[in-house]
């Protein structure tokens, strides 16, 4: 199987990963979240190499049987094709201080300059699509509106084939350049339809296993039909609830999920038990992760200011669509639901972090 890519495709593929934080579908290409480092190789060993980024920082990566290599010039590239002084992009899970094994290494041509392909990077929500003007408008996470033009050089990734596939409300990551006349030209566009995640808490009034549903009376008095499927996770004190059959009327429940077109609420996670067993967080927030620290993360909720949450040894991590065990498994751009308590000094301590690990951008 060839692992040689044309230079335009390799550069577009690389820039798409750099702006989205996700390796998109491609032949025999791993999904990688976490580190995304671009720089120059300064040392090579039998099973590792060290690279230096544009800020002069050095990072060492192991190479194992799960490491994939890509090149525009070499078929079936590997660690023996690395050279001191060569430019590479490395994608690896975990944090930069862990020296993990590289999952993907892209060998770049000497003339590669990412600023020529994605000097302008933007994330946010699409507020307008103008087919006649070949443009779309992005409201960034900071509230700024940016107009991006597209032309024959614009590449669309994921489920997109062109401008006509974009819709108002889509979450989008854009890499582009500023033209000589000050306009923004999109070179790379990655977008996804927003899936709202909501939280409902209340009392179970009815369980219907045959229909795969139960009825929840919320604390506001509203009755909701909650559907479950094979992807629904269940949690309870002492682990007594493993599925719908273990639920019963009069149980208290907290449900995380999203509304469906038929009006039924699909549960991604159900926490159930006696009322005193359920968490009663001071703060519940849903949004996009914008930064990750050594013991904290920052979340950008929609239509609200950024919120920073501390993480400690008692913080619980959960995910739908992947395995998440700690901050090292998170990446900027993921969408997360956080339940937190307010500490005495006014900081927010996360007790539950629930992410959709497969979410893009």
Image (cartoon, rainbow, N blue to C red):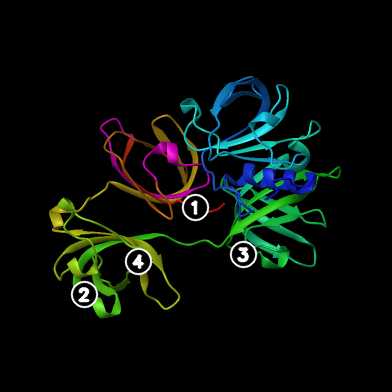
User: Per the image, is 44 magenta?
Assistant: no
**Residue contact between numbered discs 4 and 1, judged by CB atoms under 8 Å:** no
C-alpha distance separating marks 3 and 1 = 16 Å
* Residue for point 56% across, 47% down: 30
**Residue contact between numbered discs 4 and 3, judged by CB atoms under 8 Å:** no
C-alpha distance separating marks 2 and 1 = 36 Å
| Crowd class of label 4 (few under 14; some 14 to 19; many from 20; radius 10 Å) | few
First in sequence: mark 3 or mark 1?
A: 3
* Residue for point 78% across, 56% down: 150
Q: Nearer the viewer, residue 122 or 48?
A: 48
First in sequence: mark 4 or mark 1?
A: 4
**Residue contact between numbered discs 2 and 4, judged by CB atoms under 8 Å:** no
| Crowd class of label 2 (few under 14; some 14 to 19; many from 20; radius 10 Å) | many
First in sequence: mark 2 or mark 4?
A: 2
Q: Nearer the viewer, residue 36 or 352?
A: 36
First in sequence: mark 4 or mark 3?
A: 3
Which marked residue is nearer to the observer: mark 2 or mark 4? 4
Task: Say if 238 sits above or below 247 in the image.
Answer: above
Q: What secondary structure is marked by label 4? A: loop
Query: Residue 338, percent across and down?
Result: 36, 47
Which marked residue is nearer to the observer: mark 2 or mark 1? 2
* Residue for point 73% across, 22% down: 85
- Tag shown at residue 207: 2
Name the residue tied to disc 4: 230
Q: Nearer the viewer, residue 210 or 275?
A: 210
Name the residue tied to disc 3: 168
Magenta span of residues: 324-347
Query: Residue 12, percent across and down?
Result: 73, 47
């Amino acid at each position: 199987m060839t692992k040689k890519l044309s230079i335009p495709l390799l550069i577009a593929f690389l820039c798409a990963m750099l702006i989205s934080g996700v390796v998109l579908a491609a032949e025999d290409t791993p999904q990688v979240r976490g580190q995304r480092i671009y720089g120059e190789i300064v040392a090579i060993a039998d099973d590792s190499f060290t690279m230096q980024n544009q800020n002069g920082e050095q990072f060492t990566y192991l190479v194992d049987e799960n490491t994939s290599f890509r090149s525009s010039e070499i078929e079936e590239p590997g660690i023996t094709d690395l050279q001191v002084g060569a430019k590479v992009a490395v994608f690896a899970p975990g944090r930069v201080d862990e020296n993990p094994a590289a999952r993907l290494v892209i060998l770049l041509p000497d003339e590669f300059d990412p600023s020529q392909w994605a000097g302008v990077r933007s994330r946010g929500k699409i507020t307008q699509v103008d087919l006649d003007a070949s443009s779309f408008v992005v409201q960034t996470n900071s509230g700024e509106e940016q107009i991006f033009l597209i032309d024959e050089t614009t590449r669309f990734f994921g489920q997109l084939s062109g401008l006509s596939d974009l819709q108002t409300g889509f979450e989008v990551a854009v890499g582009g350049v500023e033209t000589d006349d000050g306009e923004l030209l999109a070179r790379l566009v990655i977008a996804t339809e927003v899936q709202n995640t909501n939280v409902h808490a209340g009392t179970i009034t009815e369980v219907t296993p045959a229909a795969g549903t139960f009825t929840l009376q919320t604390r506001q008095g509203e009755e909701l039909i909650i559907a479950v499927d094979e992807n629904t996770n269940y949690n309870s004190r002492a682990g007594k609830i493993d599925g719908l059959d273990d639920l019963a009327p009069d149980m208290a429940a907290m449900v995380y999920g999203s509304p469906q077109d038929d009006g039924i609420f699909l549960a991604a996670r159900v926490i159930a038990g006696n009322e005193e067993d359920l968490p009663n967080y001071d703060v519940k927030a849903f949004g996009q992760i914008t930064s990750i620290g050594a013991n904290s993360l920052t979340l950008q909720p929609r239509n609200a200011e950024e919120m920073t949450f501390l993480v400690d040894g008692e913080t619980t991590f959960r995910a739908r669509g992947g395995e998440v065990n700690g901050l090292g498994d998170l990446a900027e751009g993921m969408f997360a639901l956080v339940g937190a308590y307010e500490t005495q000094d006014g900081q927010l301590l996360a007790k539950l972090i629930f992410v959709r690990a497969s979410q893009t951008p």
